[in-house]
Amino acid sequence: MRYLLLIPTDAAHWATLTQAQRDQRLTEHVDFTRSIIASGEHVDSAVLSVPADSRTVRVRDGRTEIIEGPRSTDEEQLGGYYLVDCADDERAAEVASQVPDARFTSVEIRRLKTITGLMT
């Protein structure tokens, strides 16, 4: 079963880290990614650009509105994700606990349901 592991980020916290601490966090993510590639559970992963670089699209009454910036002004924003294929919920939680950021923030686990699977 596929799971999306959502990793929030707090720009204010990130700004307090030294370059060496940022490099260490990146190294930990590379090592973690290698481990889930080796286990066959890695499907995809990415770091998202900063929220200030985002655009939000809304369609209301047939009109498309494009807003520069994130949809939310919360301090904690989505920073990245891992898409994994795990045997069950317990294994997905185990994998999520190994994401380096779980020590500093949280990792949200969501099961994926395909649109085509919903159509049957």
Image: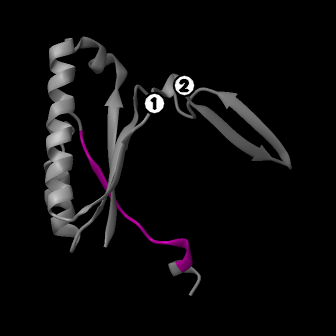
At which x and y percent is residue 104? 18, 32
Please give the name of the residue rendered at 59% of the width and 26% of the height, measured from the top-left corner.
Answer: 69
| Residue that mark 2 sits on | 53
Q: Is 94 rendered above or below residue 26? A: below
Instruction: Give the number of marks.
Output: 2
At which x and y percent is residue 38? 15, 59
Q: Badges 2 and 1: C-beta atoms under 8 Å apart?
A: yes
Please give the name of the residue rendered at 33% of the width and 31% of the height, measured from the top-left corner.
Answer: 9
Give the structural element (helix, strand or loop) at label 1: loop
| Residue that mark 1 sits on | 49
Most extreme residue toward the bottom is 120
Q: Is 21 rendered above or below residue 88? A: above
Q: Which amino acid, mark 2? A: Asp
At which x and y percent is residue 110? 35, 60
Label 2 to label 1, Cα distance in Å?
7 Å
Query: Could you tell me if residue 102 is visible in this image?
Result: no
Please give the name of the residue rendered at 21% of the width and 63% of the height, measured from the top-left corner.
Answer: 92
Please give the name of the residue rendered at 41% of the width and 66% of the height, measured from the top-left corner.
Answer: 112
Q: Does residue 34 appear to the left or right of 46 in the view shown?
A: left
Q: Confirm whether the magenta stretch covers residue 56.
A: no
Q: Does residue 89 appear to the left or right of 72 in the view shown?
A: left
Extent of the magenta region: 106-116
Q: Is 13 rendered above or below residue 106? A: above
